[in-house]
Image (tube, rainbow, N blue to C red):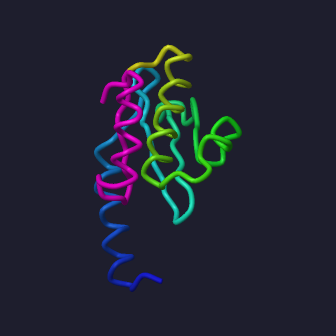
């Protein structure tokens, strides 16, 4: 369990990052959330308030591929999946929203996986 000080720092960071990032239909916000076991990504159109595409470690397409892999490798696969789903919708540019998480480890791996599949941010 994180201390109250750590939680306040995370909350402050999340508000700071989220205040600067806005997604549109042409360039949605790619929001990332990670828990201890899973990582989730969703593309959000903030002007309408709707989700365009989602991907996570719980996705049925990835379930068989992910067995026995490290968390960083799994995050990269999730990044590739969200990029493929967005490109099928005709979106190739996004705004990356790391939320309260620092840009390293699994968050960075997800971003690199999305970039490898053709997303630009």
- Residue 116 in percent (x, y) is at 37, 27
- Residue 73 in percent (x, y) is at 45, 47
Location of the C terminus by quadrant is: top left
- Residue 90 in percent (x, y) is at 50, 14
Residue 45 as seen in the image, left or right of residue 3: right
Q: Residue at x 52, y 66 (%)?
A: 36
Chain part drawn in magenta: 93-121
Q: With respect to residue 26, does 101 lie above or below?
A: below
Q: Residue at x 51, y 43 (%)?
A: 41
- Residue 82 in percent (x, y) is at 52, 32
In front: 85, or 24?
85
In front: 32, or 7?
32
Magenta span contains residue 66: no
* Tally of marks: 0
Residue 19 as seen in the image, left or right of residue 90: left
Report which quarter residue 26 is drawn in. Answer: top left
Q: Residue at x 30, y 72 (%)?
A: 9
């Amino acid at each position: 369990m994180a201390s109250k000080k750590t939680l306040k720092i995370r909350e402050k960071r999340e508000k700071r990052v989220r205040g600067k990032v806005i997604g549109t239909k042409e360039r949605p916000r790619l929001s990332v959330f990670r828990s201890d076991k899973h990582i989730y990504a969703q593309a959000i159109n903030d002007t309408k308030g709707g989700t365009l595409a989602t991907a996570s470690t719980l996705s049925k397409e990835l379930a068989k591929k992910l067995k026995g892999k490290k968390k960083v490798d799994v995050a990269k696969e999730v990044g590739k999946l969200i990029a493929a789903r967005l490109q099928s919708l005709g979106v190739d540019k996004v705004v990356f929203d790391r939320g309260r998480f620092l840009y390293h480890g699994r968050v960075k791996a997800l971003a690199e996986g999305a970039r490898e599949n053709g997303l630009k941010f």
